[in-house]
């Protein structure tokens, strides 16, 4: 075993718990048979009642517009209150109308006409209208809102209200995947009159939407309880929903198997493998760029070593991704440096940086020789056992090439807040692009000033490559654009991928009618439980 592998093994042994190890007989979490819940049945009046409790990876930071983008960051809570204009159906790989009745493009995908369902009301009784859709887009466009959907809606040059139920979106450039934006938080319509009346601060904790549920109680960061909306346009709503914060996938799986929760958000191959080997049913998805080290490229006044692309490249080349996978998952994960998983319909052999400890050492020594930097960097991780272990292993690899890494462990919610607030030097995260339209996410991650540009990268060539992704039409053109984006990314290296992620939303046998949409968000409007 080489020196680096010995160092990593010694460091990892300090934190190994039941969340990792070798000698498993299990197949890969992404292989074998996975039982998928039946999502075809829906709540009926005679099934009303009961409570479904979901363990969240990270709670929704607030109910302010545009916070419910991602399932791993509380997107189910947001969608339950607001609903969505469109839904991405992962099984059929198609966009489906939800609050919308239809969404149609013109010939070159620059103008999209949306027709709303007739008779839809918000939970306060106000009708949902085209004016509310326009108001919502304007909210997302306003930087003061802090919406994670801002990059998506910035593609819209004009919103025209044609009649009370018809909206026309005029885009600045062609975007064949525009419906994707309306499957995420940009598709959560905000009632103009109610929002204006109470103001943004109160709205963040007590929202009103057109979704299947209404707020019952909200303890930010800990617990959200939602009750059925009796006027929901989609028919009867059965359960009370309870969302709770659970620190880490190991604790989530234990809570699920102990019956404390009925739905649990699991992330990490070893935990998903444990769940599927126990024949738990759930929704499994493979996430490109799901495990990454994000480096601060100069956001929020940061002027440290990672403003130099040589330091970022040193990190990328220092990572032995196969060894990380062996130590963290017992070989069950999907180590990679590429932005796209091989299972992606857009993958065409794109590759990220190779493991090269010698090159990494040379780059670090070059930087040390030029100034006062002595190798010190801080790696921000969260306090879940699996993230602590990941941090220890990555520290060993970076220290082996000349960095001197200090680990800072904080709660998951605090790590997420600091990532989005650029209050970090280097952190463990993930990009989580949806295969429905990866261009939307990749563009958002590299657009200067964008709310999900967590690295703070500002590189004209990378920005242009991102723009070309979004305007590409047809599979061949999209693949070519993604190849170019990977090429430029490898030069700039704002973040470096070390594995794909696997996400598994475990669902108890008694729970029916949950359906997934884009970005790992679960929809509960048709859900019910057969338990009292």
Image (cartoon, rainbow, N blue to C red):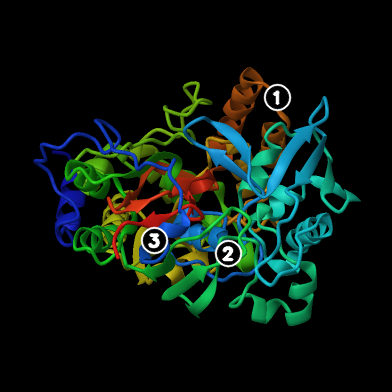
Name the residue that disc number 2 marks.
81
Name the residue that disc number 1 marks.
473
**On screen, 9 above or below 382?**
above
Q: Which of marks 1 and 2 is in front?
A: 2
Residue 34 shows up from this direction: yes
Q: Which of 384 and 319 is in front in this view?
A: 384
Give the residue drawn at x 46%, y 42%: 289
**On screen, 1 above or below 526?**
above
Provide residue 492's location: percent of width, then percent of height.
Answer: 58, 42
Q: Are marks 3 and 1 in contact (CB under 8 Å)?
A: no
Q: Quadrant of the N terminus?
A: top left
Q: Is residue 515 left or right of residue 195?
A: left
Q: Residues within 10 Å of mark 1 (few under 14, many from 20)?
A: some
Residue 446 shows up from this direction: no
Provide residue 472's location: percent of width, then percent of height.
Answer: 70, 27
Q: Nearer the viewer, residue 205 or 332?
A: 205
| Nearest to N terminus: mark 3 or mark 1 | 3
**Marks 3 and 2, Cα distance to the nearest angstrom?**
19 Å
Q: In which quarter of the image is the C terminus?
A: bottom left
Q: Residues within 10 Å of mark 2 (few under 14, many from 20)?
A: many
Q: Nearer the viewer, residue 491 or 331?
A: 331
**On screen, 267 above or below 227?**
above
Q: Quadrant of residue 409?
A: bottom left
Q: Are marks 3 and 2 in contact (CB under 8 Å)?
A: no
**Marks 1 and 2, Cα distance to the nearest angstrom?**
34 Å
Q: In this view, does 122 lie to the left or right of 407?
A: right
Q: Tag on residue 429?
A: none
């Amino acid at each position: 075993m080489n020196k680096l592998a010995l160092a990593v093994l010694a460091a990892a042994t300090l934190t190994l718990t039941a969340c990792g190890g070798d000698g498993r007989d299990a197949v890969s979490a992404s292989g074998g048979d996975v039982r998928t819940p039946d999502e075809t049945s829906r709540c009926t009046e005679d099934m009303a009642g009961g409570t479904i409790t979901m363990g969240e990876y990270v709670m929704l930071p607030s109910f302010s517009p545009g916070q419910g983008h991602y399932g791993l960051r509380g997107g189910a809570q947001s969608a339950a209150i607001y609903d969505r204009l469109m839904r991405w159906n992962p099984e059929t790989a198609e966009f489906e109308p939800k609050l919308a009745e239809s969404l149609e493009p013109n010939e070159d995908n620059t103008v999209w006409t949306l027709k709303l369902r007739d008779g839809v009301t918000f939970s306060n009784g106000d009708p949902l209208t085209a004016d509310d859709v326009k108001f919502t887009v304007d909210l997302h466009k306003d930087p003061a809102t802090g919406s994670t959907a801002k990059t998506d809606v910035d593609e819209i040059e004009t919103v025209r209200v044609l009649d009370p139920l018809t909206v026309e979106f005029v885009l600045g450039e062609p975007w064949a995947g525009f419906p994707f934006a309306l499957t995420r938080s940009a598709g959560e319509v905000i009632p103009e009159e109610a929002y204006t009346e109470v103001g943004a601060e109160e709205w963040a904790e007590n929202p009103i939407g057109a979704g299947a549920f209404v707020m019952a109680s909200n303890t930010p960061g800990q617990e959200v309880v939602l009750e059925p909306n009796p006027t929901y346009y989609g028919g009867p709503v059965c359960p009370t929903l309870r969302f709770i914060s659970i620190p880490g996938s190991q604790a989530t799986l234990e809570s699920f198997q102990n019956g404390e929760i009925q739905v649990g958000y699991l992330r990490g191959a070893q935990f998903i493998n444990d769940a599927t080997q126990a024949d738990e049913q759930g929704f499994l998805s493979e996430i490109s760029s799901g495990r990454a080290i994000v480096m601060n490229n100069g956001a929020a006044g940061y002027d440290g070593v990672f403003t130099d692309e040589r330091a970022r490249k040193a990190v990328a080349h220092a990572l032995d991704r196969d060894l990380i996978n062996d130590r963290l998952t017992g070989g069950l994960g999907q180590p990679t440096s590429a932005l796209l998983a091989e299972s992606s319909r857009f993958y065409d052999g794109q590759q990220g940086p190779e493991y090269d400890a010698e090159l990494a050492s040379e780059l670090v020594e070059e930087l040390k020789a030029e100034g006062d930097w002595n190798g010190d960097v801080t790696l921000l991780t969260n306090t879940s056992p699996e993230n602590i272990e990941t941090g220890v292993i990555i520290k060993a690899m970076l220290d082996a090439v000349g960095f001197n890494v200090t680990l800072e462990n904080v709660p998951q919610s605090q790590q997420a807040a600091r990532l989005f607030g650029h209050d970090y030097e280097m952190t463990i995260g993930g990009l989580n692009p949806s295969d429905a339209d990866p261009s939307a996410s990749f563009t958002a991650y590299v657009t200067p000033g964008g709310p999900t540009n967590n690295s703070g990268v500002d590189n004209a060539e990378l920005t242009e490559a991102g723009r070309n992704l979004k305007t590409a039409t047809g599979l061949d053109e999209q693949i070519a654009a993604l190849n170019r984006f990977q090429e430029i990314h490898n030069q700039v290296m704002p973040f470096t991928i070390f594995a794909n992620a696997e996400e598994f939303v475990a669902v108890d046998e008694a729970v029916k009618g949950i359906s997934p949409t884009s970005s790992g968000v679960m929809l509960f409007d048709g859900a019910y439980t057969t338990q009292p």
